[in-house]
Image (cartoon, rainbow, N blue to C red):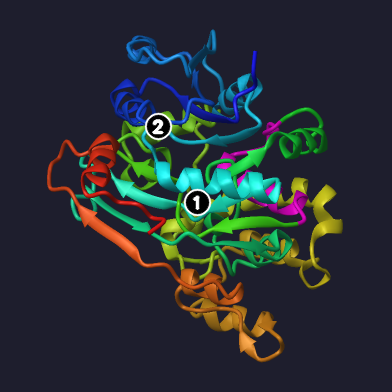
Amino acid sequence: MTRPLLSIIIPTRSRADVLAATLATLVMLKRPDIEFVISDNASTDATEQTVRQFADARIRYVRAPSRLPMAKNFELGLQHATGEYVTTMGDDDFIVEENLELAIAAALEEQCELVYWHRAFFYWGSYQDSSLSGSFSLPGGRGHYAVNPHVLLGLALLGALDYMYMPSIYNSLCKRSFLQRYYRHLRGQYFPDYVVSMDVFSALAFSSLSPSVLFQQSPASVSGISHHSNGMSIYTGGDECEKFAQELGFNDGAVILPEAYKGLVRPLTNLGLSQLSVLTDYCNTVGHLLNFSYPFVPRDFMNSNMFLRRLHLEGHVEIRDDSELFARIVSLNNSEPLLRNDQLIYFFNLWSIPAPQSYAGRFDSAEANVWHLANHLATIGFNAAK
């Protein structure tokens, strides 16, 4: 049997309503050498029936016999992926076909291990915040740029750059040889037991293990944010938040976002309260990760994990002007401060990448989902390569 060029892994659990729309968009992709690996975490709804209603030979359905922590369900999907390149998407996400083709072409032409893109977002009509529901913004452009991920790692650990500006399991084409090396470094696991968030951990791990990566201006995937979305459930609360804690394996009543840190520390600069939950992920993974990644981190950033731990431990310290603080800590060429008020502009300036134009819009319908977005882009002839 011929190995597919690309495996797209979709971990899911009891979210058949959103998965149906996502699968409807995936089967629209024309490329035959893709497999869609649905990693079902022992769903109790109609997930299996939903998957099987799509008569597409590229779909592979894998089901855990009993409920797993979220990381183990990701492991299940990765273990069953057979493609030469691998990426992961949420069960409410969307692939932009034209941009995926650009990423594949770049990966094959440059023979690189990682091609990644910034994570664009689409808020489903069902999202709880009506001021955002139905909205999207997709950056365009066709450029690819070499980026030093070790610098990204150092900046992220200093709190100067969001992890979403780094390659991760969600927003990258990962070559199989890289994933095998990553797997060996982690002693036979993609996500060890101490991992809380797969995207945060993989961003740190990928950036520590790869000497160089390609950054693509236009996103090959769009992160859908629906009423089920795990990360956003922290802020919207309710049953989905409780389910998220269970997915993570937090069955002992552990608090995802500690009350002690609300309004006190902004460790991820300029992101404010909306990213405080990431602090737990960083502090949980940094100590383990840097045990083997120290040799890959620039010397200037060797103590950055100690700085982050101090922020975590001294939660009573309020940083009122974090941009000024970090600008004093790090500077570029001893002149321009590294920090900018807008991290996206800062990222582009750092690597001399021209900022792309974005196509933004909004659906008014409460039923709007990624299938509607896919058809909208097809109707208007959207092509980010233009």
- Whether residue 196 appears in magenta in the rendering, the answer is yes
Q: How many C-alpha atoms fall within 10 Å of the one at disc 2: few (<14), some, or many (≥20)?
A: some
Kindly tell me whether residue 183 is visible in this rendering: yes
Residue 241 pos. (x, y %): 39, 36
Q: How many C-alpha atoms fall within 10 Å of the one at disc 1: few (<14), some, or many (≥20)?
A: some
Which residue carries the number 2 mark? 29
Amino acid type shown at disc 2: Leu
Image quadrant where one finds the N terminus: top right
Q: Kindly indicate the quadrant of the structure image that contains residue 53.
A: top left
Kindly tell me whether residue 281 is visible in this rendering: no
Residue 35 pos. (x, y %): 52, 23
Considering the numbered disc 2 on the image, is that residue within a helix, a strand or a loop? loop
At a point 48% along the width and 25% down the height, the residue shown is 32
Instruction: Say if 130 sits above or below 368 in the image.
Output: below
Position of 129 compared to 348: left or right? left
Q: Nearer the viewer, residue 181 or 359?
A: 359
